[in-house]
């Protein structure tokens, strides 16, 4: 019986020692912190552009409406709506019979006056001889000379009328003044047209004008000559041009400035289509840029983790422009700093990191 307390004490001490050993092992395991696997990049300077983008519309600057310049019947229209035409192409022919008859009449009048003038010239010459011999008076000669001058002026007027009729006759052929597409054709063969009646409307794509509305707050930064890059849904071609002008009035309803830029001979661009314009306001030649995922928001503010000796150091930074997946850093970093890219969101200050081999030397 007296041995039982001793045995119980030995068992209790053994259990206590084992428990203490287990606690020490657990503490050692907890003290081990695993390194976070991350990718890194070197901080470099980049040239970036400060831009503003707007969506506007395209306007055709050369969209001529061809109208009748003489009253006549349409003999034939050679084009249809949607046809492509070239500059100088024959569009329609009008009946020029009336003009031809008027020209014949005018030419006959010219011939009549010329005959009278020739005869009057002979009379003046003959009378001049007679006055030298004092057979007639000077007044009689002066009257004949005046009549001769009248006939000369009548001949000038008659020839001018012939020229006018010839010019009007040329209007019977309707010629395309520019290359483009036939937008509308309200007349057809056999129609009678009065002066001013529309024959066809041509939409030209040679010169288009982009209208881009920008907020009035940008008025001090926008000016003619700035580079603007234009894109439209109807074409894959991007056009780089410059701001031609700014409309002087700010739109009353939208409070925007109308920025105007011209587009010349752009393949696939169409009047009336929407256009996206990006204006380059300025350029930063040495901007410190980092990937967006490197910037993390913490209670201290915007931070970036710089890796030194496999330890991530939290650096508070000031960010600027965001462009193409990159963020400009205005302060806090220096060139060639090694920063965490992938995995930055899982880090804390002084956290150990393990750099992935494939991204270790990657640069922005």
Image (cartoon, rainbow, N blue to C red):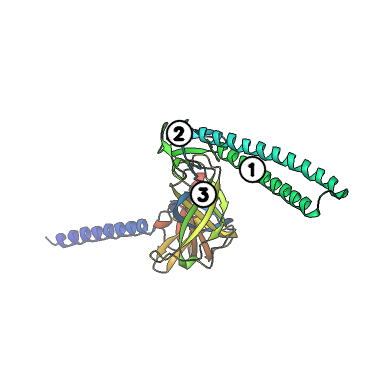
Circle 3 crowding by C-alpha within 10 Å: few under 14, some 14–19, many from 20: some
Q: Quote the CA–CA distance across marks 3 and 1.
A: 41 Å
**Left/right of residue 10 with respect to residue 341 in the rendered view:** left
The residue that mark 2 highlights is 74
Label whose residue precedes the other's in the sequence (2 or 3): 3
Q: Which of the pair 328/135 is nearer the observer?
A: 135
- Viewer-side residue, 160 vs 263: 160
Crowding at mark 1 (Cα within 10 Å: few <14, some 14-19, many 20+): many
* Residue pictured at 39% horizontal, 64% vertical: 254
Q: Earlier in the sequence, mark 3 or mark 1?
A: 3
Which residue is most to the left?
A: 1
Q: CA distance from mark 1 to mark 2?
A: 29 Å
Q: Looking at the image, can residue 32 be seen?
A: no
Q: Nearer the viewer, residue 114 or 169?
A: 114
Pointers 2 and 3 in contact (C-beta within 8 Å) = no
Q: Secondary structure at mark 1?
A: helix
Residue at horizontal 40 percent and vertical 66 percent from the top: 252
For label 3, the SS is: loop
- Which of discs 1 and 2 lies nearer the camera? The answer is 1
Question: Horizontal and vertical percent for residue 348?
Answer: 42, 62
Which of the numbered marks, if any, corresponds to residue 32? none
Q: Mark 2: give few (<14), some (14-19) or many (20+) Cα within 10 Å.
A: many
Q: Nearer the viewer, mark 2 or mark 3?
A: 2
Query: Which residue is located at x 34 percent, y 60 percent?
Result: 27
* Image x and y of residue 21, in percent: 31, 58
Instruction: Give how far across and how far down residue 14 sits, in percent.
Output: 25, 58
* Tag 3 residue: 61
- Residue 135 in view of the camera: yes
- Give the residue number, with chain letter if any, for mark 1: 158
When asked about the image quadrant of residue 106, the answer is top right
Q: Quadrant of the N terminus?
A: bottom left
- State the CA–CA distance, disc 2 to disc 3: 29 Å
């Amino acid at each position: 019986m007296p041995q039982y307390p001793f045995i119980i004490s030995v068992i209790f001490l053994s259990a206590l020692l084992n428990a203490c050993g287990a606690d020490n092992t657990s503490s050692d395991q907890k003290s081990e912190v695993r390194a976070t696997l991350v990718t890194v990049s070197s901080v470099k300077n980049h040239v970036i552009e400060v831009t503003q983008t707007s969506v506007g519309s395209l306007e055709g600057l050369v969209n001529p409406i061809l109208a009748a310049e003489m009253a006549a019947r349409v003999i034939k229209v050679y084009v249809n709506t949607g046809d492509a035409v070239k500059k100088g192409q024959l569009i329609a022919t009008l009946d020029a019979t009336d003009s031809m008859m008027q020209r014949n009449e005018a030419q006959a009048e010219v011939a009549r006056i010329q005959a009278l003038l020739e005869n009057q010239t002979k009379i003046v010459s003959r009378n001049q001889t007679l006055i030298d011999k004092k057979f007639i008076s000077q007044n009689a000669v002066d009257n004949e000379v005046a009549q001769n001058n009248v006939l000369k002026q009548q001949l000038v007027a008659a020839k001018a009328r012939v020229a006018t009729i010839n010019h009007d006759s040329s209007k019977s052929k309707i010629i395309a003044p520019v290359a483009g597409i036939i937008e509308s054709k309200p007349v057809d063969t056999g129609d009678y047209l009065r002066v001013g009646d529309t024959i066809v409307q041509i939409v030209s794509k040679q010169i288009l004008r982009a209208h881009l509305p920008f907020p009035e707050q940008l008025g001090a930064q926008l000016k003619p000559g700035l580079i603007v890059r234009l894109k439209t849904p109807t074409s894959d071609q991007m056009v780089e041009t410059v701001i031609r002008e700014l409309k002087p009035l700010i739109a009353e309803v939208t409070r925007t400035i109308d920025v105007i830029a011209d587009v010349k001979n752009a393949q696939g661009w169409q009047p009336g289509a929407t256009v996206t314009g990006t204006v380059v306001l300025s350029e930063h030649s040495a901007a410190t840029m980092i990937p967006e995922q490197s910037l993390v928001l913490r209670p201290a503010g915007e931070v970036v983790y710089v890796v030194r000796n496999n330890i991530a150091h939290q650096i508070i930074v000031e960010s600027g422009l965001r462009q193409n997946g990159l963020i400009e850093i205005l302060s806090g970093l220096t060139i060639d700093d090694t920063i965490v890219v992938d995995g930055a969101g899982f880090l804390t200050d002084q956290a150990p990191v393990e750099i992935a081999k494939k991204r270790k030397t990657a640069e922005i």
